Image (cartoon, grey):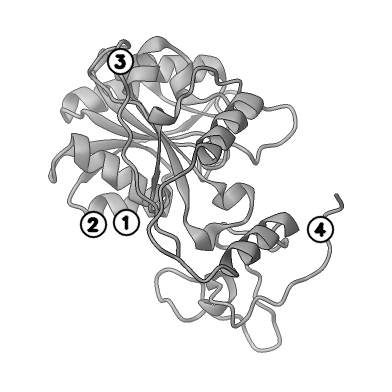
């Protein structure tokens, strides 16, 4: 099907923070432009391209039925996620017991964090750090410890594995928040980088909460490698979060899938699923 990448949408009056919150949310949204200048909505991560029409059609069709009661996810829902990850990321063996849904990626991060750490605990994050992580983690009473990314001789941002190891040990950290691909620096991690990072986490018995929401939007020549796929140990200590919000421009719907692999129980355990969905 053809897709319209050129028409400019009028997003004003549609509760779009990208345009309607400019100059209205001090400390979060940018200041309003000077008179005679237009708002450029590039400060927040949603798209100015129309959502694909088949999604709109499915929403309209469902909304035409007058009942909106409680529901449970169907096999079709789980099968579509399993098929997506197999086709896009080469993931095999994924079952519906490993899949849950949450109230946004940040809600999923905090749900996982509160399951395995207590307020006051230190949490490892790479810097520069997505502002949503900063606010969510600190507002829930956790202490952020940063391990800064460093540029190599070719100007590529890399993880500092020695620093990660030292910070985890010094601060008695047992939960880390990971970002793959990385936001905001944009790195799509190579396999050897993921393997080395997961070895650091394994050596320190550290749970990994991996935000992989950007995995479908990467440049040619790069390929997303799911964090939990790099080793059997990674599979048992990773909570990986994905969402359709970036891929299909659905940020206002806040439906997030979670591959929730129960840590500390070994590779023979049956993963647990923490499930709920909130649509806004």
**What numbered label is drawn on residue 202?**
3
Circle 2: element type: helix
Residue at 29 percent across and 20 percent down: it is 165
Residue picked out by circle 2: 139
Q: Is residue 133 visible?
A: no
Mark 2, mark 4: which one is toward the viewer?
Answer: 4
Mark positioned earlier in the residue sequence (3 or 4): 4
How many C-alpha atoms fall within 10 Å of the one at disc 4: few (<14), some, or many (≥20)?
few
Residue 129, how many percent across, how many down?
Answer: 41, 45
The alpha-carbon separation of the residues under discs 2 and 4 comes to 38 Å
How many C-alpha atoms fall within 10 Å of the one at disc 3: few (<14), some, or many (≥20)?
some
Front residue of this view, candidates 244 and 191: 244
Q: Is residue 145 above or below residue 38?
A: above
Mark positioned earlier in the residue sequence (2 or 3): 2
**What numbered label is drawn on residue 5?**
4
Residue 221, how many percent across, how many down?
Answer: 73, 27
- From this viewpoint, which residue is outermost toward the right? 2
């Amino acid at each position: 099907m053809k897709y319209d990448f050129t028409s400019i949408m009028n997003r004003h009056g549609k509760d779009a923070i990208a345009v309607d919150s400019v100059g209205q949310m001090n400390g979060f949204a940018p200041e309003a432009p000077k008179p005679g200048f237009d708002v450029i909505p590039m400060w927040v991560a949603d798209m100015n391209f129309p959502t694909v029409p088949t999604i709109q059609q499915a929403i309209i069709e469902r909304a035409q039925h007058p009942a909106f009661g409680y529901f449970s996810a169907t096999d079709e829902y789980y099968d579509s996620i399993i098929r997506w990850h197999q086709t896009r990321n080469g993931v095999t063996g994924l079952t519906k017991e490993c899949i849950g849904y949450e109230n946004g990626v940040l809600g999923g991060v905090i749900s996982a964090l509160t399951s395995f750490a207590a307020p006051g605990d230190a949490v490892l994050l790479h810097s520069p750090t997505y502002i949503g992580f900063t606010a969510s983690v600190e507002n829930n009473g956790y202490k952020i410890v940063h391990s800064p990314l460093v540029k190599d001789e070719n100007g590529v941002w890399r993880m500092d594995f020695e620093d990660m190891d030292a910070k985890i040990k010094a601060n008695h950290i047992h939960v880390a928040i990971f970002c793959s691909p990385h936001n905001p620096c944009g790195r799509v991690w190579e396999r050897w980088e993921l393997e080395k990072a997961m070895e650091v986490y394994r050596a320190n018995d550290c749970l990994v909460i991996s935000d992989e929401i950007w995995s479908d939007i990467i440049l040619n020549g790069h390929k997303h490698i799911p964090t939990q796929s790099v080793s059997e140990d990674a599979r048992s200590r990773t909570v990986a979060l994905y969402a359709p919000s970036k891929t299909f421009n659905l940020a206002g719907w806040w439906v997030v899938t979670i591959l929730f692999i129960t840590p500390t129980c070994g590779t023979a355990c049956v993963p647990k699923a923490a499930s709920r969905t909130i649509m806004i």
